[in-house]
Amino acid sequence: MLRFLTPKPVLFVTLAPTLEVADARNAGRADIERVHGTFAVLRQEMADELASVGWWFDTSALTPEQTAAAISTKASTRAVLPR
């Protein structure tokens, strides 16, 4: 029973398409779902604080389904946070 109490690894994935792709995807969203402004500032802040954390995954060329599949198969080796 104690084996169920063993902590599981923490995985951290940052979806990081290019700024151009992020802006294009944002433009295609309904207004209520849209981020107003560009992603440049957010991307820079994330890079400043999280650049060495987990897996920065460029999803620019992927569909949501392909992104989910890649995370499912690769995150356990690429996104593990040190303890």
Image: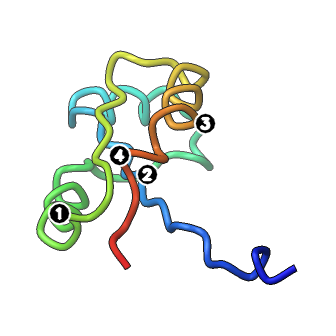
The earlier-in-sequence mark between 1 and 4 is: 1
For badge 2, the amino acid type reads Val
Question: Considering only vertical position in the picture, is 2 above or below 50?
Answer: below
Mark 1–mark 3 Cα distance, whole angstroms, equals 33 Å
Q: Select label 1 or label 3 by which is in front.
A: 1
Circle number at residue 35: 2
Q: Select label 1 or label 4 by which is in front.
A: 4
Q: Select label 2 or label 1 by which is in front.
A: 1
Which residue bears the numbered disc 1? Answer: 52
Mark 1–mark 4 Cα distance, whole angstroms, equals 12 Å
Crowding near the residue tagged with mark 2, few <14, some 14–19, many ≥20 C-alpha atoms within 10 Å:
few
**Which of the two residues, 13 or 25, is positioned nearer the viewer here?**
13
Q: Are marks 1 and 4 in contact (CB under 8 Å)?
A: no
Question: Considering only vertical position in the picture, is 63 above or below 17?
Answer: above
Q: Select label 2 or label 4 by which is in front.
A: 4
Circle number at residue 4: none
The earlier-in-sequence mark between 1 and 3 is: 3
For badge 3, the amino acid type reads Ala
Which residue bears the numbered disc 4? Answer: 78
What x and y, as percent, mark residue 58?
29, 33
Q: Assign a secondary structure to mark 4.
A: helix
**Which of the two residues, 29 or 19, is positioned nearer the viewer here?**
19
Q: Is residue 1 left or right of residue 10?
A: right
Circle number at residue 30: 3
Q: Assign a secondary structure to mark 1.
A: loop
**Which of the two residues, 74 or 17, is positioned nearer the viewer here?**
74
Q: Select label 4 or label 3 by which is in front.
A: 4
Q: Are marks 1 and 3 in contact (CB under 8 Å)?
A: no
